[in-house]
Image (cartoon, rainbow, N blue to C red):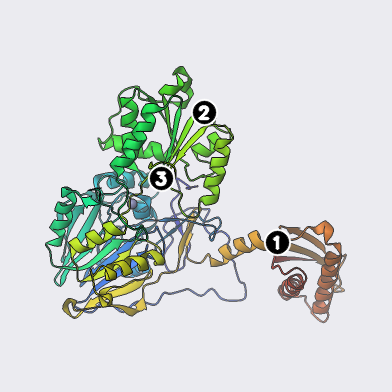
Amino acid sequence: MIKKNNAPIRRDNTTKTNATGKTGVKNKRKSPKKPFVKRQDPKVTPIAEGNIRIIPLGGVEEVGQNMTVVEYGDDILVFDCGFQFVSEETPGIDYIIPNTKYLEQNKHKIRALIITHGHLDHIAAIPYIIHEIGNPPIYAGNIATLLIKKRMTEFPHLAEIDIKTVKPKEKLRLGKLGIKFFEVAHSIPDSMGVSVETPHGNIVISGDYKLEHVNEVPTQKEYDNWGEIGKDNNLLFISDSTNAEMQGFSIPEKYIQSNIEEIIKNASGRLIIGAFASQFHRLISIIEMAEKYNKKVVLEGRSIKTNLEIAKIAGLLIPKEGTLIQAKDMNQFPPDRILVLATGAQGEEFAALMRMANKKHKFIQLNKRDTVVLSSSVVPGNEISVRKLMDNLYRHDLKIIHYKVSDIHSGGHGRQGELMWAAKMVGAKYFMPSYGNHSMLKVHAQAAKENGIVKEENIVVPDNGSIIEIQEKGTVMKIIKEKAPSNVIMVDGFSIGDMQEVVIRDRQTLAQDGIFVVIATIDLKTGKLRKSPDIISRGFVYLRESQEMLQQSRNLVKKTVEDDAKGMKPIDFDIIKKDITDNIGRFLLKKTDKRPIVIPVVLGV
Ligand SMILES: [Zn+2]
């Protein structure tokens, strides 16, 4: 899905093209009649002295494309730079990235891009954005640094980035702002929260987090880490809302891993474990457990291989020689010594698990002695594809263990009990739920209010692009009327832009109502049609059963063309085409209640 080895090409009009690719602009509609107007986003009023601005540019109306801006005086700090995987609402689009117009307009003030952890929804938009915002230095933890560097190798045309590795407890001075990092528990190592010191108090950004706990009592380490941050004069807490709708505490990862260990220990045949590549800790522990029980491990799927390679480089995984084997060699070992660790537990069409399930895998043929463990939850929206995967797996009469029948998955995000504990520890005056859909943010905000953590008037629930200002020396917080540009920016193959609404709408229309092409040939001398118009359609109605409607359409095209052409000298093809589109579109809607895309092709002879 990810197109590699090509520098991104900007498709919008207000930023310069930053690459020399030939593929360039595609699908953009040209209008010969209207002059091309350059779109200029209005500039937001500059920040007043003494105020603090917080601008979530992404990640507060969706899970993904996280980016938060903190601005004070002459300094801007940017936190995270993620993308969002896309849905059925944006057919053909690879992913969505934050709108950075505000940052592009204030490039000179940006002191750094700070990364909380290495997940794609926090780092993956860097290649598309970093040069647009002036290539500021990037600060990130060790694993995130390695993953960012790896991702940049997929964009060899881009200039070097300036990345520096930081650790928890480290402090930096960036412009007039001080920041410090603190360790948080998440599903990837080196995850950190960040506290930004301003003269009016600190802004604490949680990053993604959960808590390490025993029976809902956080561990001493959590008390130490969050307690240290809680000592400061904290003005605002910006906190992860991904799992705010779930009550209580999340299942500890250690418990999940010990359940998986039981399964590995007792497997009498081959074991195929499907997992998220983002779950670093779990992937590493599965390999360690495989070694403990004398099993060979086959890695299947690019993202799992990449992430474990990074874990090896970071020294977090040191597999014994011979533990990792190739799929083609697995038949040299008895089945009970084989563990396959694979991507695709969400039913992704081309991922390893689905290929095995569909008998399309070159080396792994499933049989009824196999056990498949789906160590992942079903991401909302993927229910149908996961069901399809399970159906196809069960066709092999094997055994499936999934998270509904056994505790073999827990996400990386804290549930409400954990979120409230952390908010209380931070003890900030103001609260802003972040990272999640609006509904998740609202539930998080309500919980903070109902638990007495912060007063209702001190909570703000923003949209992407909302500008939150803390004014009057920290005594007032509000969302101001102006907004940073926030229209959706999409990555579509090699190009990036915010002007693709038309393309997306066409794709949706094509999918729903199909296409209807009319080909008419006009005799330029007489203005009459040379022959009855040709009609081609796809995805609209079954033409063989619609002969009458087709004939009526042909008559309507003929009448439209000949009425128009009467008295036209020379014949204006644009007017004729527009009238065909309008008349046929209206006629088909009346007849079928559908709006296919009507494409008129008019030839003159
Ligand atoms: Zn994460």
Q: CA separation, marks 2 and 3?
A: 29 Å
For the point 30% across and 53% down, the residue is 249
**Image x and y of residue 341, in percent:** 42, 34
For the point 21% across and 51% down, the residue is 218
**Image x and y of residue 513, in percent:** 68, 63
138 in relation to 521, above or below: above
Residue corresponding to mark 2? 364
Graded by Cα atoms within 10 Å as few (under 14), some (14 to 19) or many (20 or more), the crowding at tag 2 reads some
Which numbered disc, 1 or 3, marks the residue that appears first in the sequence?
Answer: 3
**Of discs 1 and 2, which sits in the foreground?**
2
In terms of secondary structure, where does tag 1 sit? strand
For the point 21% across and 76% down, the residue is 51
Which numbered disc, 2 or 3, marks the residue that appears first in the sequence?
Answer: 3
For residue 316, side relative to residue 506 (left or right): left
Q: Report the amino acid beneath label 2.
A: Ile
Q: CA separation, marks 1 and 3?
A: 37 Å
Q: Nearer the viewer, residue 148 or 337?
A: 337
Residue corresponding to mark 1? 515
Could you tell me which quadrant the C terminus lies in? bottom right
Residue corresponding to mark 3? 154
